[in-house]
Image (tube, rainbow, N blue to C red):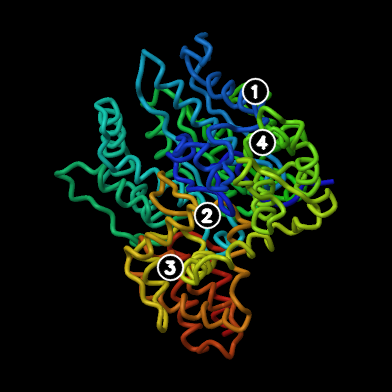
Amino acid sequence: MPPNDCGDDHYVAGAHGTVAEQTDEAYYDDRSDADDDMEKGRIKFPQNKLYGRDRELETLRNIFYQGLSSEETQDGCVVEMPEQASRVVFLSGYSGVGKSALVKEFVKQVQAQQKMNKSSSESVLHFSGKYSEQSSAAAPFSAISDLFSQMTHALSRKKSDKEGNELQSKILNDIGSSGLLAANADGDRVLRGTFPVLAALLDASRPNDSNNKSEEGGGGAPSMNAVKESVHELLSIISGPLKRPLILFLDDLQWADAPSLDLLSFLLSTDAQMKNVMFICAYRSNEVGQDHPFASIMDNVKESMKDDVQLVETVDLFSLSQDVITQFIAVSIGKEEEVEEVTELAEVVYQKTMGNIFCVMQAMEELVRKNALYYDMMCFEWRWAVSKVELSTTISDDVVETVKGKIKELSSEIQYMLIVMAYVPNTLEVPVLTELMKRNSVSLDESRVAELLKKATEEALLMYSAESDNYIFIHDRIREASRGSIADEDKDDLLLHLSLVLQKLAKGPETEWCLFVAVDLLNSLPSEKTNCNDLARLNMRVSVIARNRGIVEKQSELLHEGFSA
């Protein structure tokens, strides 16, 4: 039987009815005294520990270090490779088994090892992007654009250490002196046109005396081959001077759009001959059958392994065992020395969650909210005074409904913010989110929205991403619960409002994503809610942008919608 389709994180900090703040620092930093939390009746979920994944972590570390040329591994050994070959990891598992959490812990470990390496203090560069059904439908290359956004953010800002600044300068200089920015080359135009988020990185790489800045949108639509070659060259330039592989993580590839898969197929192929890059490609195994386009990509890449051109590994994640869940619950409620006392509770929770840590935490919180699990202030310990049957019936079978119940207990402002974020697939900066939330009597300033984001993070509904400097949903199930938290009779009016605001926010290439989202929101509305002429014009306008980016399928879709309006 497959595990429940639930969350994707295996270690977080938590509290009564909530899971505490999910900033990068909070993941690895014990923010408060455990005894103090217990006295307040707050569950404190274990921090700084990934449960039950030692073997998988070792596999990732091994392929990371095996790809190096005469470099020291985490065990102090030296591995000799003919060249810094690329390496590819296909990471599979049902939703909620912990794919993203595994990658986070892996990156954390190689970064820690790098800091201990006396020969070099150079940081490990890693960037990620995540697909969703909504983002892939709204605009092609969504996860790759997110990855490039993180890359631009990381390489364009000043470093605090000397070696970091030297590496950054080296990469920027290499980009600036490459063929990408040459006077008669198309690479700069292709990258800016297809991935507007790269504009700041390309500008920072351009020599000060250069006047060869490309004109966005000039020269006609880039071909897919031009996009492939330009992205390949950019990644090769960035990974070239690194002493450790560049880690690129793409998540939920079962939802990737056709152009993304076409580009990824090329980058993973032996024809691309990528070096010093580690691709981690995660997908839901139950949603990628033999006829799925991503399945053929995996088959082709695995076939290339026979020629020893690149390192390829498949990692399959399965649900955690009942023993691991029992240990997790025991630590969470301060019973690590009396694990046998929580056996009955853990058995019920395990049976309801099928070993999914996110679902386990939601179940524990639900038990607390419904007073089936409570903190005895007289005895200073957690207790439950109901039978296994009562415990089981207290826990919902649907994690989305559980999260919706949690959201409904929050303030109306936080609820509205989460709903708005759920219907816009892109990560939102505070100013953009503030504009989207201005509606009728609701008018919040940026400082208030920032406070709401922090509170939602403390409730473990959002997580701060240092790479993108934005807040994101911890998991798709939380986004789904947020989308379902608006009454049906109010939904259409909200989508119309969001579409109109997004159109006003689209003021240049870097905000063209607003138009893609806006037109998709309008196209989803019943005809009586929209002006057919305005809708047709918007579809035609965005189809031109899609054409200029070389995204033929999206262009055809928008043209069809425009003529049908």
Q: Are marks 2 and 4 in contact (CB under 8 Å)?
A: no
Q: Earlier in the sequence, mark 2 or mark 4?
A: 4
What label does residue 328 carry, if any?
Answer: 4
Extreme-top residue of the structure: 77
Q: Residue placed at 83% from the left, 48% from the top?
A: 388
Residue nearer the viewer, 348 or 6: 348
Q: Quadrant of residue 526?
A: bottom right
Report, in whole angstroms, how far the alpha carbon at label 2 lies from the one at label 1.
Answer: 49 Å
Q: Residue placed at 14% from the left, 44% from the top?
A: 209
Q: Residue placed at 75% from the left, 55% from the top?
A: 395
Q: In the rendered structure, which amino acid carries the disc numbered 1? A: Asp
Report, in whole angstroms, how far the alpha carbon at label 2 lies from the one at label 4.
Answer: 20 Å
What label does residue 459 carry, if any?
Answer: 2
Q: Residue placed at 85% from the left, 46% from the top?
A: 1
Q: Earlier in the sequence, mark 3 or mark 4?
A: 4
Q: Secondary structure at mark 2?
A: loop
**Marks 4, 1: nearer the viewer:** 4
Report, in whole angstroms, how far the alpha carbon at label 3 lies from the one at label 4.
Answer: 42 Å
Dot 1 surroundings within 10 Å: few (below 14), some, or many (20 or more)?
few
Q: In the rendered structure, which amino acid carries the disc numbered 4? A: Phe
**Marks 1, 3: nearer the viewer:** 3
